[in-house]
Amino acid sequence: MFVQKAILLDAPAMDRALMRMAHEILEHEPGSNLVLAGIVRRGVPLAWQLAENIEKVSGDKVPVGALDVIPFRDDLQEAAPPSRSKVDFSVEGKTVILVDDVLFTGRTVRAALDALLEFGRPRAVRLAVLVDRGHRELPIRPDFVGKNIPTSQKERIEVRLPAFDNAKEVAILGQVE
């Protein structure tokens, strides 16, 4: 069982981090070849907020899609349900920013790369995460990070979003022994 230890980012801090990330994305990826792909579940609303922030800063609308990684996970033993991915635009020749809430082992991102290739071959793929907590099992590094939060293996990071949790915050939880 896990219990909340602290709130690491409240709603205004999350908004500031996402606005900063939007500025960084535009700084590194200017132009109209940019698309966002949120990883189902919490990566999708974060991708939409990044797209809104990019539009506020640059005036450009950025397409947003959703990638369901469950069918591409290498750590699931049972048959995967049908994909819930929704990408209504071409990724061919585009720079795709994968968006997720927390980067931990890297396995979700590896699965997201496989899911993305079902939609074509992008020019480049970059990774944006709200929280990087370390403990990588695969050689995956984010390009855009809202906050680095070193954790122990006995801790959890929980990103709470209005679409799912009726809150907007990032909490750290500790395991009760």
Image: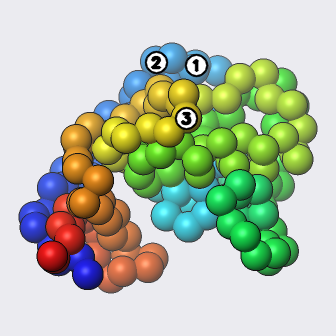
Numbered disc 2: secondary structure: helix
Counting from the top left corner in percent of width and height, residue 129 is at: 44, 43
Tell me if mark 2 has few (under 14), some (14-19) or many (20+) residues whose alpha carbon lies within 10 angstroms of its own: few
Compared across the picture, whether 12 is left or right of 92 comes to left
Question: Is any atom of residue 59 visible in this view?
Answer: no
Distance of label 2 from label 3 (alpha carbons): 27 Å
- Determine the image quadrant of residue 145: top left
Counting from the top left corner in percent of width and height, residue 32 is at: 69, 26
* Residue at x 68% of width, y 66% of height: 76
Q: Quadrant of the N terminus?
A: bottom left
Tell me if mark 3 has few (under 14), some (14-19) or many (20+) residues whose alpha carbon lies within 10 angstroms of its own: few
* Residue at x 86% of width, y 31% of height: 121
- Tell me, yes or no, whether the two marked residues, 1 and 2, touch with CB atoms within 8 Å: yes
Q: In the depicted view, which residue is nearer to us: 83 or 105?
A: 105
* Residue at x 29% of width, y 53% of height: 153
Counting from the top left corner in percent of width and height, residue 63 is at: 69, 46
Distance of label 1 from label 2 (alpha carbons): 6 Å
Residue located beneath label 1 in the image: 30
Three-letter amino acid code of the residue under disc 2: Glu
Compared across the picture, whether 156 is left or right of 6 comes to right
Q: In the depicted view, which residue is nearer to us: 88 or 72?
A: 72
Three-letter amino acid code of the residue under disc 1: Pro
